[in-house]
Image (cartoon, rainbow, N blue to C red):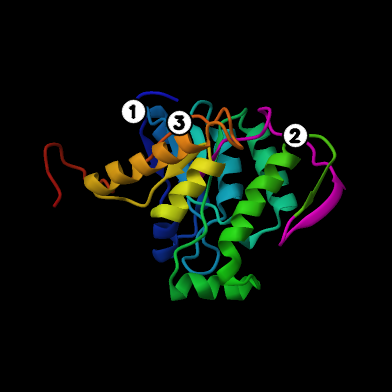
Amino acid sequence: MSGLKIGYLLPTRDQTVRAEHEPGRLVAQARRAERLGFDSVWAGDSPVTRPRADPLLLLAAVAEATERVALGTAVLLPALRHPILLAHQLATLDRLSGGRLIAGMGGGFPNPDTRAQFTAVGVPFGRRISRLEESVDAMRLLWSGEQVSYRGEHFAFSDVRIAPPPSRPGGPPVWLAGTGGPALRRVARLADGWLPYPPTTATYAEDLRTVADELRSIEEGARPAAPSPPLCTRRSVWTGTRRGRVCG
């Protein structure tokens, strides 16, 4: 990817707050975003803390309703799921969309509400990052389309093959969310792209240097062909019905 691209985050949470519960409207918004020239459409994930439509089911419907836009999760919480099931879902979605999926993933904000969500699902909150890292490794193996085995601290399986395989060899690109030293090093080590929490200009530049430095430090290590990852930032834009009116 090169140049500036603009995506649209579907208001899945806003719809729940308004008690609309009309996911079909979100699909219509995605279709309109494509017509208006947006490059990508995104959906968030939070089954309990900030309830909303399931991002993978929603994006499956969007895949059928659109032709061009990339489809992304911003962000998916893989630590809440088993990597075999999630790899299968993402591979099917990538196949359904013709290779348009971006698997944006994160560990979840370290706050009481997010902790309660992990507790409700039965996942230890303090292990969410190591589960995230294992999930990425395990899913990339599964996306090969071959029969594979994996053994980690949290997940282990033998002679497993998922079908259909993703549309693209190796699976959809994985973008990781996060800021701060450990998260940025994880981006450089594991990810194909970076999804930072909305930063200030100075923080963004500093974090970008950290990612670049870490990439350089591992170029001759475990990821010899590690690419410079696509970078993403997010801003809220409020629109109105009158031309020339500035909302503030």
Q: CA distance from mark 3 to mark 1?
A: 15 Å
Residue 230 visible, this angle: yes
Where on the picture, by quarter, is residue 96? top right
Tell me which residue sits at (60%, 48%) in the image. Answer: 56
Q: Amino acid at mark 3?
A: Ser
Q: Quick check: 7 above or below 106?
A: above
Which residue, given by chain and number where applicable, does mark 1 sit on?
Answer: 4
Q: Residues within 10 Å of mark 3 (few under 14, many from 20)?
A: some
As drawn, the label of residue 228 is: 3
Q: In x, y percent, where is residue 17?
A: 40, 65
- Magenta span: 152-175
Q: Which of the two residues, 21 or 60, is positioned nearer the viewer here?
A: 60
Distance in Å between CA atoms under marks 3 and 2: 23 Å
Query: Which comes before the other along the chain, label 1 or label 2?
Result: 1
SS for callout 2: loop
| Residue depth check, mark 1 versus mark 2: number of the one nearer the observer | 2
Is 219 left, or right, of 94 in this rendering?
Answer: left
Amino acid of disc 1: Leu
Instruction: Classify residue 211 by image quadrant.
Output: top left
